[in-house]
Amino acid sequence: MRTLTELVCIGTLALAAGCAHGPAADDSTYQGLGGQGGIKKIVDTFVPLILADARIRDSFRDTDLKNLSMRLEEQFCALSGGPCTYRGKDMKEIHDGLNITNAQFNALAEDLQAAMDRHGVAPAVQNKLVARLAPMQREIVTK
């Protein structure tokens, strides 16, 4: 499992290499995730993992899980270079007042990695998606 430091490093390296916060320049990561169907399967595995994770499940107690799944699918698709548009709120607004810690952020990343592992996503593809998500840590972690 990746540590928060590794996530931030991956994100920093991606930014240093000229990657932007927006969608990937090509769709190789999207294809590596299995396209829309693969992303849906990953999210369908990921959401139950976070709900079962004692480290973070309380943060999702009052969450509309159908909406969460839909937004995660959009976000992963868009960030991986797929043909989707993320229609959710920005990360700062969504997580405002939730007092998310670095440990909780890291737990979520571990659960995402486990979901991708279960669907046979190659480590290099996982790293590319995580590199796109890691910069969001600054907007999500508030405690």
Image: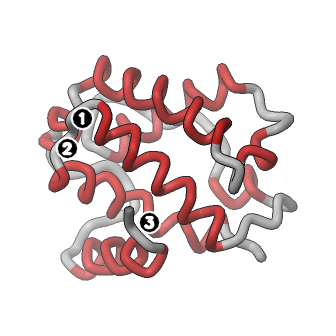
**Contact? badges 2 and 1 (CB < 8 Å):** yes
Identified at 36% across, 35% down, the residue is: 77
Q: Tell whether 129 sits left or right of 40.
A: left
**Contact? badges 3 and 2 (CB < 8 Å):** no
- Amino acid type for the residue under numbered disc 2: Thr
Residue 54 percent across, percent down from the top left: 71, 49
Mark 3 residue element: helix
- For the residue pair 56 and 100, the one nearer the viewer reads as 56
Toward which corner of the image does residue 124 lie, by quadrant?
A: bottom left
- Amino acid type for the residue under numbered disc 1: Leu
The image's mark for residue 29 is 2
Disc 3: which residue: 134
Toward which corner of the image does residue 64 lie, by quadrant?
A: top right
For marks 3 and 1, the one nearer the N-term is: 1
Disc 1: which residue: 33
Identified at 55% across, 37% down, the residue is: 49
Using a 10 Å C-alpha cutoff, classify the residue at mark 3 as few (fewer than 14 neighbours), some (14 to 19) or many (20 or more).
many
